[in-house]
Amino acid sequence: MKRIPVVDTSCIHAGTMSFAKYKKTIEVGDTAILLLGYDNMLQLMIEKDKIYQTKYGALRCNELIGTRYGRRVQCSKGWLYVLHATPELWTVTLPHRTQILYATDISMIVFQLDLKPGSVVIESGTGSGSLSHAILRSVAPSGYLHTFDFHAQRVEKARQEFEEHGLGHLVSVAERDTCKNGFGLECVADAVFLDLPGPWDVLPFAKQAFKAEGGRICSFSPCIEQVQRTCETLEKLGFTDIQSLECLARTFDVRTVNMPLANLGGGVDIGVEGDQSGSLHQPCIGHIEYDTGGRDAKNTKKRRGDGDTPDGSTEDGASKKWSDGGNGGDAGDGRTKMSESASFVFKTAHPPVQMPGHTGFLTFATLYPD
Protein backbone atom coordinates (compact mmCIF):
# COMPACT_ATOMS: atom_id res chain seq x y z
CA MET A 1 0.00 0.00 0.00
CA LYS A 2 1.45 3.34 -1.05
CA ARG A 3 1.07 6.31 1.26
CA ILE A 4 1.16 9.96 0.25
CA PRO A 5 4.28 11.91 1.19
CA VAL A 6 4.23 14.30 4.11
CA VAL A 7 4.02 17.90 2.92
CA ASP A 8 7.03 19.90 4.13
CA THR A 9 6.26 23.62 3.98
CA SER A 10 9.35 24.77 5.86
CA CYS A 11 11.31 25.26 2.64
CA ILE A 12 8.72 27.58 1.10
CA HIS A 13 9.88 31.18 1.19
CA ALA A 14 7.31 33.82 2.07
CA GLY A 15 7.88 35.66 -1.21
CA THR A 16 7.74 32.60 -3.47
CA MET A 17 5.20 32.80 -6.29
CA SER A 18 2.20 30.55 -5.62
CA PHE A 19 -1.11 30.10 -7.37
CA ALA A 20 -2.54 28.96 -4.03
CA LYS A 21 -2.13 32.30 -2.25
CA TYR A 22 -1.78 35.96 -3.16
CA LYS A 23 1.24 38.20 -2.69
CA LYS A 24 1.51 41.93 -3.31
CA THR A 25 4.94 42.49 -4.89
CA ILE A 26 6.23 41.38 -8.31
CA GLU A 27 9.50 39.46 -8.06
CA VAL A 28 11.93 37.66 -10.38
CA GLY A 29 10.62 34.21 -11.32
CA ASP A 30 6.94 35.11 -10.96
CA THR A 31 4.37 34.13 -13.56
CA ALA A 32 2.31 37.27 -14.22
CA ILE A 33 -0.79 37.91 -16.33
CA LEU A 34 -0.96 40.90 -18.67
CA LEU A 35 -4.42 42.38 -19.18
CA LEU A 36 -4.37 44.13 -22.55
CA GLY A 37 -8.12 44.61 -22.88
CA TYR A 38 -11.41 42.78 -22.69
CA ASP A 39 -10.87 39.08 -23.42
CA ASN A 40 -7.21 39.75 -24.28
CA MET A 41 -4.68 38.44 -21.76
CA LEU A 42 -1.17 37.01 -21.90
CA GLN A 43 1.02 35.17 -19.39
CA LEU A 44 4.73 35.86 -19.00
CA MET A 45 7.67 34.99 -16.75
CA ILE A 46 9.28 37.88 -14.87
CA GLU A 47 13.02 37.75 -15.65
CA LYS A 48 15.70 40.34 -15.05
CA ASP A 49 16.59 42.43 -18.14
CA LYS A 50 13.84 40.68 -20.12
CA ILE A 51 11.80 42.78 -22.58
CA TYR A 52 8.43 41.66 -23.94
CA GLN A 53 6.84 43.21 -27.02
CA THR A 54 3.10 43.92 -26.81
CA LYS A 55 0.67 45.74 -29.07
CA TYR A 56 1.06 48.75 -26.78
CA GLY A 57 4.84 48.79 -27.02
CA ALA A 58 7.79 47.30 -25.15
CA LEU A 59 7.32 46.03 -21.59
CA ARG A 60 10.54 45.93 -19.52
CA CYS A 61 10.58 43.49 -16.63
CA ASN A 62 13.12 45.59 -14.71
CA GLU A 63 10.45 48.31 -14.38
CA LEU A 64 8.00 45.79 -12.89
CA ILE A 65 10.25 44.12 -10.32
CA GLY A 66 9.48 45.41 -6.83
CA THR A 67 6.18 47.06 -7.82
CA ARG A 68 2.69 45.95 -6.81
CA TYR A 69 0.41 43.56 -8.66
CA GLY A 70 -2.66 45.18 -10.16
CA ARG A 71 -0.92 48.40 -11.17
CA ARG A 72 -1.35 50.06 -14.53
CA VAL A 73 1.79 50.10 -16.65
CA GLN A 74 2.29 52.83 -19.24
CA CYS A 75 3.89 51.76 -22.52
CA SER A 76 4.84 53.80 -25.57
CA LYS A 77 1.52 53.18 -27.37
CA GLY A 78 -0.87 52.68 -24.47
CA TRP A 79 -1.21 51.03 -21.07
CA LEU A 80 -1.96 47.62 -19.60
CA TYR A 81 -2.39 45.93 -16.20
CA VAL A 82 -0.11 43.37 -14.53
CA LEU A 83 -2.20 40.85 -12.55
CA HIS A 84 -1.34 38.15 -10.05
CA ALA A 85 -1.82 34.71 -11.61
CA THR A 86 -4.76 32.56 -10.50
CA PRO A 87 -6.02 29.17 -11.78
CA GLU A 88 -8.83 30.98 -13.62
CA LEU A 89 -6.44 33.38 -15.42
CA TRP A 90 -4.03 30.54 -16.12
CA THR A 91 -6.82 28.57 -17.82
CA VAL A 92 -7.38 31.49 -20.20
CA THR A 93 -3.69 32.06 -21.03
CA LEU A 94 -1.94 28.68 -20.69
CA PRO A 95 -0.09 27.08 -23.64
CA HIS A 96 -2.36 24.33 -24.97
CA ARG A 97 -0.84 20.87 -25.19
CA THR A 98 -4.25 19.22 -25.28
CA GLN A 99 -7.87 20.30 -25.18
CA ILE A 100 -8.60 21.72 -21.77
CA LEU A 101 -11.46 22.19 -19.34
CA TYR A 102 -12.65 25.75 -18.79
CA ALA A 103 -14.03 27.56 -15.75
CA THR A 104 -17.64 26.45 -16.28
CA ASP A 105 -16.80 22.74 -16.02
CA ILE A 106 -14.01 23.25 -13.48
CA SER A 107 -16.27 25.03 -11.00
CA MET A 108 -18.82 22.22 -11.18
CA ILE A 109 -16.12 19.56 -10.73
CA VAL A 110 -14.61 21.22 -7.67
CA PHE A 111 -18.07 21.69 -6.15
CA GLN A 112 -19.40 18.19 -6.85
CA LEU A 113 -16.22 16.45 -5.67
CA ASP A 114 -16.46 18.40 -2.40
CA LEU A 115 -12.81 19.47 -2.56
CA LYS A 116 -11.47 21.37 0.44
CA PRO A 117 -8.14 21.96 2.22
CA GLY A 118 -6.69 18.58 3.16
CA SER A 119 -8.43 16.55 0.43
CA VAL A 120 -6.38 13.96 -1.48
CA VAL A 121 -7.27 13.79 -5.17
CA ILE A 122 -6.28 11.44 -8.01
CA GLU A 123 -6.40 12.84 -11.54
CA SER A 124 -5.93 10.69 -14.63
CA GLY A 125 -5.29 12.80 -17.71
CA THR A 126 -3.10 15.76 -16.70
CA GLY A 127 -3.09 17.27 -20.18
CA SER A 128 -2.30 20.99 -20.07
CA GLY A 129 -2.87 21.24 -16.32
CA SER A 130 -5.91 23.53 -16.42
CA LEU A 131 -7.99 21.51 -13.94
CA SER A 132 -4.90 20.53 -11.94
CA HIS A 133 -4.21 24.13 -10.89
CA ALA A 134 -7.79 24.59 -9.69
CA ILE A 135 -7.65 21.34 -7.71
CA LEU A 136 -4.37 22.33 -6.07
CA ARG A 137 -5.72 25.73 -5.05
CA SER A 138 -8.76 23.98 -3.50
CA VAL A 139 -6.83 21.36 -1.48
CA ALA A 140 -3.97 23.66 -0.33
CA PRO A 141 -2.20 23.95 2.05
CA SER A 142 -2.48 20.44 3.51
CA GLY A 143 -4.01 18.41 0.65
CA TYR A 144 -2.34 16.53 -2.18
CA LEU A 145 -2.87 15.72 -5.86
CA HIS A 146 -1.69 12.58 -7.68
CA THR A 147 -1.94 13.26 -11.41
CA PHE A 148 -1.10 10.85 -14.25
CA ASP A 149 -0.58 11.12 -18.01
CA PHE A 150 0.68 8.59 -20.55
CA HIS A 151 2.64 11.22 -22.56
CA ALA A 152 6.21 11.74 -21.27
CA GLN A 153 6.70 15.29 -22.61
CA ARG A 154 3.40 16.49 -21.15
CA VAL A 155 4.34 15.00 -17.80
CA GLU A 156 7.68 16.76 -17.74
CA LYS A 157 6.20 20.11 -18.81
CA ALA A 158 3.44 19.89 -16.20
CA ARG A 159 5.96 19.06 -13.47
CA GLN A 160 8.03 22.11 -14.48
CA GLU A 161 4.99 24.42 -14.41
CA PHE A 162 3.89 23.21 -10.98
CA GLU A 163 7.33 24.02 -9.59
CA GLU A 164 7.39 27.47 -11.21
CA HIS A 165 3.94 28.23 -9.81
CA GLY A 166 4.82 27.30 -6.25
CA LEU A 167 2.68 24.14 -6.24
CA GLY A 168 5.34 21.45 -6.51
CA HIS A 169 5.04 20.44 -2.83
CA LEU A 170 1.33 19.69 -3.30
CA VAL A 171 1.46 17.42 -6.36
CA SER A 172 3.17 14.40 -7.89
CA VAL A 173 3.14 13.96 -11.67
CA ALA A 174 3.76 10.50 -13.11
CA GLU A 175 3.91 8.98 -16.58
CA ARG A 176 1.57 5.98 -16.50
CA ASP A 177 -1.01 4.19 -18.63
CA THR A 178 -3.72 3.99 -16.00
CA CYS A 179 -6.13 2.14 -18.31
CA LYS A 180 -3.81 -0.91 -18.18
CA ASN A 181 -1.80 -0.46 -14.99
CA GLY A 182 -4.10 1.51 -12.72
CA PHE A 183 -2.80 4.14 -10.30
CA GLY A 184 -0.62 2.02 -8.04
CA LEU A 185 -2.40 3.60 -5.07
CA GLU A 186 -4.75 2.10 -2.50
CA CYS A 187 -6.87 3.64 0.25
CA VAL A 188 -5.53 7.20 -0.15
CA ALA A 189 -8.05 9.23 -2.18
CA ASP A 190 -11.02 11.36 -1.19
CA ALA A 191 -11.88 12.11 -4.83
CA VAL A 192 -10.98 10.81 -8.30
CA PHE A 193 -11.22 12.58 -11.66
CA LEU A 194 -10.96 10.75 -15.00
CA ASP A 195 -10.45 12.34 -18.42
CA LEU A 196 -9.81 9.25 -20.53
CA PRO A 197 -11.10 7.67 -23.76
CA GLY A 198 -12.16 4.53 -21.82
CA PRO A 199 -12.89 5.48 -18.20
CA TRP A 200 -14.75 2.20 -17.53
CA ASP A 201 -11.42 0.35 -17.68
CA VAL A 202 -10.01 2.49 -14.85
CA LEU A 203 -13.05 2.41 -12.53
CA PRO A 204 -11.98 -0.82 -10.72
CA PHE A 205 -8.58 0.76 -9.95
CA ALA A 206 -10.31 3.94 -8.83
CA LYS A 207 -12.45 2.00 -6.38
CA GLN A 208 -9.31 0.50 -4.83
CA ALA A 209 -7.75 3.97 -4.50
CA PHE A 210 -10.55 5.39 -2.34
CA LYS A 211 -10.19 5.62 1.41
CA ALA A 212 -12.21 3.27 3.62
CA GLU A 213 -14.82 5.99 4.15
CA GLY A 214 -15.39 6.29 0.38
CA GLY A 215 -15.54 9.46 -1.71
CA ARG A 216 -16.69 11.07 -4.95
CA ILE A 217 -15.67 10.34 -8.53
CA CYS A 218 -16.06 12.35 -11.75
CA SER A 219 -15.57 11.26 -15.36
CA PHE A 220 -15.44 13.64 -18.33
CA SER A 221 -16.63 12.12 -21.62
CA PRO A 222 -17.15 13.80 -25.01
CA CYS A 223 -20.09 11.64 -26.18
CA ILE A 224 -23.21 10.14 -24.62
CA GLU A 225 -22.26 6.56 -25.59
CA GLN A 226 -19.22 6.76 -23.32
CA VAL A 227 -21.41 8.20 -20.57
CA GLN A 228 -23.84 5.28 -20.80
CA ARG A 229 -21.10 2.67 -20.59
CA THR A 230 -19.44 4.51 -17.70
CA CYS A 231 -22.71 4.66 -15.75
CA GLU A 232 -23.31 0.93 -16.26
CA THR A 233 -19.83 0.11 -14.93
CA LEU A 234 -20.23 2.46 -11.96
CA GLU A 235 -23.47 0.73 -10.99
CA LYS A 236 -21.89 -2.72 -11.22
CA LEU A 237 -19.01 -1.64 -8.95
CA GLY A 238 -21.37 -0.39 -6.24
CA PHE A 239 -21.25 3.36 -6.86
CA THR A 240 -24.45 5.28 -6.13
CA ASP A 241 -25.89 8.78 -6.67
CA ILE A 242 -24.92 8.54 -10.34
CA GLN A 243 -25.74 11.63 -12.39
CA SER A 244 -24.53 13.16 -15.65
CA LEU A 245 -24.40 16.91 -16.32
CA GLU A 246 -23.66 19.12 -19.30
CA CYS A 247 -22.38 22.56 -18.32
CA LEU A 248 -22.93 25.37 -20.80
CA ALA A 249 -22.48 29.10 -20.24
CA ARG A 250 -25.61 30.86 -21.49
CA THR A 251 -25.35 34.49 -22.51
CA PHE A 252 -28.17 37.03 -22.67
CA ASP A 253 -28.28 40.13 -24.85
CA VAL A 254 -29.84 43.19 -23.15
CA ARG A 255 -32.12 45.10 -25.51
CA THR A 256 -34.41 48.12 -25.37
CA VAL A 257 -37.94 47.28 -26.54
CA ASN A 258 -40.43 49.94 -27.66
CA MET A 259 -43.93 48.50 -27.48
CA PRO A 260 -46.81 50.72 -28.76
CA LEU A 261 -49.85 50.82 -26.49
CA ALA A 262 -53.08 49.59 -28.07
CA ASN A 263 -55.45 52.19 -29.50
CA LEU A 264 -58.78 51.37 -27.86
CA GLY A 265 -60.48 54.62 -28.91
CA GLY A 266 -60.85 57.85 -26.94
CA GLY A 267 -57.36 57.64 -25.49
CA VAL A 268 -55.45 54.65 -24.14
CA ASP A 269 -56.36 53.48 -20.64
CA ILE A 270 -53.15 52.31 -18.98
CA GLY A 271 -55.05 50.75 -16.09
CA VAL A 272 -53.39 52.59 -13.20
CA GLU A 273 -55.85 53.62 -10.53
CA GLY A 274 -55.40 56.64 -8.31
CA ASP A 275 -57.25 58.36 -5.53
CA GLN A 276 -58.44 61.94 -5.43
CA SER A 277 -55.09 63.11 -4.10
CA GLY A 278 -53.39 61.87 -7.26
CA SER A 279 -51.29 59.13 -5.61
CA LEU A 280 -50.87 55.87 -7.54
CA HIS A 281 -51.54 52.49 -5.96
CA GLN A 282 -49.94 50.43 -8.75
CA PRO A 283 -46.84 52.12 -10.23
CA CYS A 284 -45.90 51.21 -13.81
CA ILE A 285 -42.73 49.29 -14.59
CA GLY A 286 -40.66 50.81 -17.34
CA HIS A 287 -40.90 54.10 -19.16
CA ILE A 288 -44.08 55.41 -20.83
CA GLU A 289 -43.58 57.88 -23.65
CA TYR A 290 -46.25 59.78 -25.59
CA ASP A 291 -46.68 62.70 -27.93
CA THR A 292 -49.95 64.63 -27.60
CA GLY A 293 -48.99 67.19 -30.25
CA GLY A 294 -50.46 70.64 -30.97
CA ARG A 295 -52.72 72.22 -28.34
CA ASP A 296 -52.64 69.18 -26.03
CA ALA A 297 -48.87 69.36 -25.71
CA LYS A 298 -49.15 72.72 -23.94
CA ASN A 299 -51.48 71.25 -21.32
CA THR A 300 -49.29 68.23 -20.51
CA LYS A 301 -48.59 67.91 -16.81
CA LYS A 302 -46.79 65.42 -14.57
CA ARG A 303 -48.58 63.71 -11.74
CA ARG A 304 -46.53 62.53 -8.79
CA GLY A 305 -47.19 59.25 -7.03
CA ASP A 306 -46.10 58.01 -3.62
CA GLY A 307 -42.93 56.45 -5.04
CA ASP A 308 -42.10 59.26 -7.48
CA THR A 309 -39.29 61.76 -7.33
CA PRO A 310 -39.79 65.47 -8.18
CA ASP A 311 -38.55 64.90 -11.74
CA GLY A 312 -41.22 62.29 -12.44
CA SER A 313 -38.98 59.21 -12.07
CA THR A 314 -39.67 56.43 -9.59
CA GLU A 315 -37.34 55.32 -6.82
CA ASP A 316 -36.38 52.18 -8.78
CA GLY A 317 -35.17 54.24 -11.72
CA ALA A 318 -38.29 53.81 -13.87
CA SER A 319 -39.83 56.94 -15.33
CA LYS A 320 -43.55 57.80 -15.78
CA LYS A 321 -45.08 60.60 -17.81
CA TRP A 322 -48.74 61.38 -17.41
CA SER A 323 -51.18 63.25 -19.67
CA ASP A 324 -53.67 65.46 -17.81
CA GLY A 325 -54.95 67.94 -20.36
CA GLY A 326 -57.10 68.24 -23.48
CA ASN A 327 -58.84 65.11 -24.65
CA GLY A 328 -56.23 62.83 -23.06
CA GLY A 329 -56.70 63.89 -19.45
CA ASP A 330 -58.21 62.27 -16.38
CA ALA A 331 -61.27 60.16 -17.18
CA GLY A 332 -63.00 61.36 -14.01
CA ASP A 333 -63.07 57.94 -12.36
CA GLY A 334 -59.51 58.02 -11.07
CA ARG A 335 -58.04 56.22 -14.12
CA THR A 336 -55.41 57.94 -16.25
CA LYS A 337 -55.51 57.87 -20.05
CA MET A 338 -52.65 58.33 -22.49
CA SER A 339 -52.70 59.70 -26.03
CA GLU A 340 -52.98 57.40 -29.04
CA SER A 341 -49.26 57.71 -29.84
CA ALA A 342 -48.12 56.49 -26.40
CA SER A 343 -45.63 53.62 -26.22
CA PHE A 344 -44.09 51.51 -23.45
CA VAL A 345 -40.27 51.33 -23.42
CA PHE A 346 -38.51 48.72 -21.29
CA LYS A 347 -35.30 46.70 -20.98
CA THR A 348 -35.29 42.95 -21.51
CA ALA A 349 -32.78 40.13 -22.01
CA HIS A 350 -32.90 37.72 -24.95
CA PRO A 351 -30.98 34.44 -25.15
CA PRO A 352 -29.31 33.71 -28.51
CA VAL A 353 -31.22 31.55 -30.97
CA GLN A 354 -28.21 29.26 -31.35
CA MET A 355 -25.85 28.85 -28.42
CA PRO A 356 -22.34 27.57 -29.23
CA GLY A 357 -20.72 25.24 -26.73
CA HIS A 358 -18.40 22.29 -26.35
CA THR A 359 -19.49 18.68 -26.42
CA GLY A 360 -18.77 17.12 -23.07
CA PHE A 361 -20.55 15.47 -20.17
CA LEU A 362 -19.57 15.23 -16.50
CA THR A 363 -20.61 12.01 -14.77
CA PHE A 364 -20.53 12.02 -10.96
CA ALA A 365 -20.99 9.17 -8.50
CA THR A 366 -20.45 8.39 -4.81
CA LEU A 367 -18.76 5.41 -3.19
CA TYR A 368 -20.08 4.83 0.31
CA PRO A 369 -18.28 2.76 2.98
CA ASP A 370 -19.00 -0.98 3.01
Image (tube, rainbow, N blue to C red):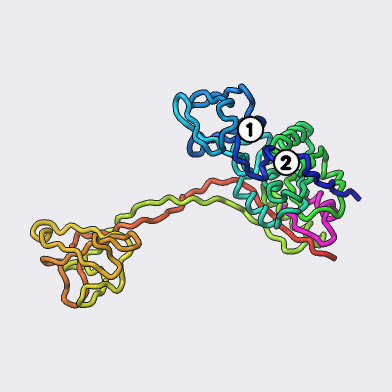
Residue 369 picture location, percent across and down:
83, 64
Q: Is the residue marked by circle 2 packed among few (<14), some (14-19), or many (20+) residues within 10 Å?
A: many
Numbered range of the magenta stretch: 198-218
- Residue 93 higher or lower than 332, as above or below: above
The picture places residue 37, in percent across and down from the top left corner, at 48, 36
Residue farthest toward the right in the current orientation of the protein:
1
User: Which residue is drawn at the image coordinates 46% and 24% (left, top)?
Assistant: 76
Q: Would you name the residue on which mark 1 appears? A: 27
Relative depth, front residue between 85 and 175? 85
Residue in the picture at 16% in, 76% down: 332
In this rendering, position of residue 107 left or right of residue 210: left
The disc label shown at residue 167, or none: 2
Name the quadrant of the C terminus.
bottom right
**Picture residue at 30% right of the left edge, 68% below the top:** 307
Amino acid type assigned to the residue bearing label 2 in the image: Leu
Whether residue 109 is visible to the viewer of this picture, yes or no, is yes
Mark with earlier residue (1, 2): 1
Q: Is residue 53 magenta?
A: no
- In the foreground, 245 or 88: 88
Question: How far from the left and from the top, in percent, is residue 268?
Answer: 21, 67
Q: Secondary structure at mark 1?
A: loop
Q: Type of residue at label 1?
A: Glu
Neighbor class of circle 1 (other Cα within 10 Å; few <14, some 14-19, many 20+) is many
Q: Does residue 207 belong to the magenta stretch? A: yes
Rounded to the nearest angstrom, the CA distance separating label 1 from label 2 is: 17 Å
Vertical relation: 244 (above or below) 358: below
